[in-house]
Image (cartoon, rainbow, N blue to C red):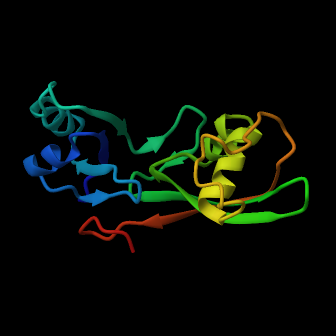
Amino acid sequence: MTPQYLIRIWGRDTARVSSLRVPDAIEPNGVLCYWFHTTQDRADFRAFISDNLMVVSSVVNPGYDHDGEPVDTHALTYARITLRLPDGREGTFDQCFGYGYPEHSVHYMWEDGYYSCDCNRRLFLTRHCDIDSEETDLDTLDVRCGESIELVSLEIYHTPTTPEGGVH
């Protein structure tokens, strides 16, 4: 039976965590992923990681989330986003949200959450779409808050892991 209980670990000391056990997978953003057969096995592994290490962890359980959406802990959630600036320039990019990330949460982030504001959308366009990238100092880039950058499309897709933990 394939282990289903996921723990995701990130932070400054992930190299020390991966020396305790080789990760089953590493997300594109560097988050270490470990799957276990039981919640107790997962808790035992987390307890083995020293509190002195600078890492954060989150757990993802199989089944359904609080909104009733099925959670596949082995599916890596991505979104393909297209944004349009008021002057008509558009940029499209892919963003990884991690294993077991619910689709409704992706929608929330882009439609009402942190990524719905122009200040964050502008940074995504600069970093991922090379729009106005001549501004090498992102601290001086004009990233005012607002709602003028349009979310043209948001397509969610999933990439499953292989039995060995790697991404297809």
Depicted 17 relative to depicted 85: above or below: above
Measured along the vertical axis of the image, is residue 134 above or below residue 13?
A: below
Q: Where, by quadrant of the figure, is residue 48 drawn?
A: top left
| Residue at the image position 67 percent from the left and 42 percent from the top | 120
Quadrant containing the C terminus is bottom left
Query: At 55% across and 45% down in the image, what residue appears?
Result: 102
88 displayed left or right of 28: right
Q: Residue furthest bottom?
A: 168
Camera-nearest residue between 47 and 27: 27
Q: In screen coordinates, is 153 left or right of 130?
A: right
Q: Position of residue 77 (x, y in %)?
A: 52, 56
Camera-nearest residue between 100 and 81: 81
Please state the horizontal and vertical placement of residue 19, each as a whole percent of the image.
9, 50
State the quadrant of the N terminus: bottom left
Q: Position of residue 84 (x, y in %)?
A: 83, 58
Toward which corner of the image does residue 67 lie, by quadrant?
top right
- Residue at the spot 58% in from the left edge and 48% down from the top edge: 137
Q: Residue at x 30, y 68 (%)?
A: 166
Give the quarter of the image for residue 66: top right
Q: Residue 154, image x and y in percent?
A: 72, 57
In this rendering, the count of numbered labels is 0
Front in this rendered view, residue 39 or 110: 110
User: On the picture, is 58 further left or further right than 116?
Assistant: left
Q: In this view, which residue lies farthest toward the top?
A: 51
